[in-house]
Image (cartoon, rainbow, N blue to C red):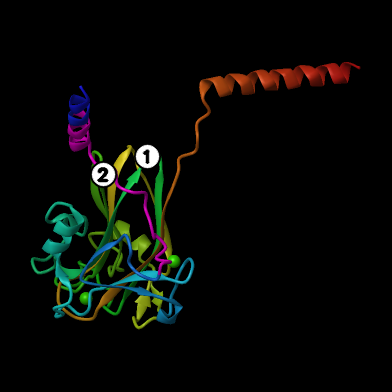
Amino acid sequence: MQKLIILLSIIITWISPALALPLSNGGFETGNLNHWQTLGLVNVETSVFGSGPKQGNFQVFLNTEDGTSTNTASIDNIEAFLGVSQGLVDSIHPSPGPSFGAKDGSAIKQNFHASAGETLSFQYNFLTSDGLWGGGVDPDASRDVSFVTLTGPNLSFGKILSNTLDIPNAPEETLVSINPFRSSPTPFNLETGFRHVSLMLPNDGNYTVGFGVANSGFVGASSGLLVDQVSTTPSQPVPEPSTLLLLTSGLIGLATWHRRQRAC
Ligand SMILES: [Ca+2]
Ligand SMILES: [Ca+2]
């Protein structure tokens, strides 16, 4: 019987999906990339970099270099690394010209466990030394892109954070509002400044969050992405029905007590 129990427990353990740990080192305050996996050119930076960190003393920096680097990864390898479908980045970053697609860059990811209703949030700053381009002006112009990916239970998507598009009437006109650039105190010419993003995690389970930055179109000047303060926030607790009942009866009791006090 004991052997049967042991065997059953081994089978149950084997068929149960392993739970990932909660998100860790989301602010990079260990001073290194513990708990993160990286591809391409990724390192931890301090305030010496010229922008950030947004929280604490450290942040992560992802670099595209100039499109001729052998240190970066191809966009196909980045998409495979992040566990999203091939072509995802180009599908959220449409190409008006045949030579326009995302080419190469860098990425980081972390697997973590979360409960339904938790919020994943982070801060990012997109940096570029490319010019600002519009597809309507030059369909083959360079247009670097930064993005976030999230995969999990019944969930797999990518979203552009910012790119080097800044011309009205271009195909992605709706994205212009996320691309107000200013001059950058970093080694790059321009930056968006830090922006806060929150994503709802709809289900209990294991998730993978990824961040990437890639050259697009012609090779040329590089772009980069700073990320900091990646964190999860528990959902607001919903009172149990019994708690609600107690609370309601307490309020009724309080109201009755008040009426009695006023009547005195
Ligand atoms: Ca930090
Ligand atoms: Ca570039």
- Quadrant of the drawing holding the C terminus: top right
Residue that mark 2 sits on = 152
Residue at 17% of width from left, 30% of height from top?
7
Residue at 18% of width from left, 35% of height from top?
15
Please, what is the dominant secondary structure of the magenta stretch? loop
In this picture, which residue range is highlighted in magenta? 8-30
In the rendered image, residue 59, in percent from the top left (x then y), is placed at 40, 69
Is residue 252 found left or right of 219 in the rendered image? right
Closest to the observer: 258 or 182? 258
Q: Which secondary structure, mark 1?
A: loop
Q: Residues within 10 Å of mark 2 (few under 14, many from 20)?
A: many
In the rendered image, residue 61, in percent from the top left (x then y), is placed at 33, 72
Residue that lies at the very extreme toward the left in this rendered image: 98
Closest to the observer: 168 or 162? 162
Indicate the quadrant where residue 113 lies.
top left
Residue at 74% of width from left, 22% of height from top?
254
Residue that mark 1 sits on = 115
Residue that lies at the very extreme toward the right in this rendered image: 264
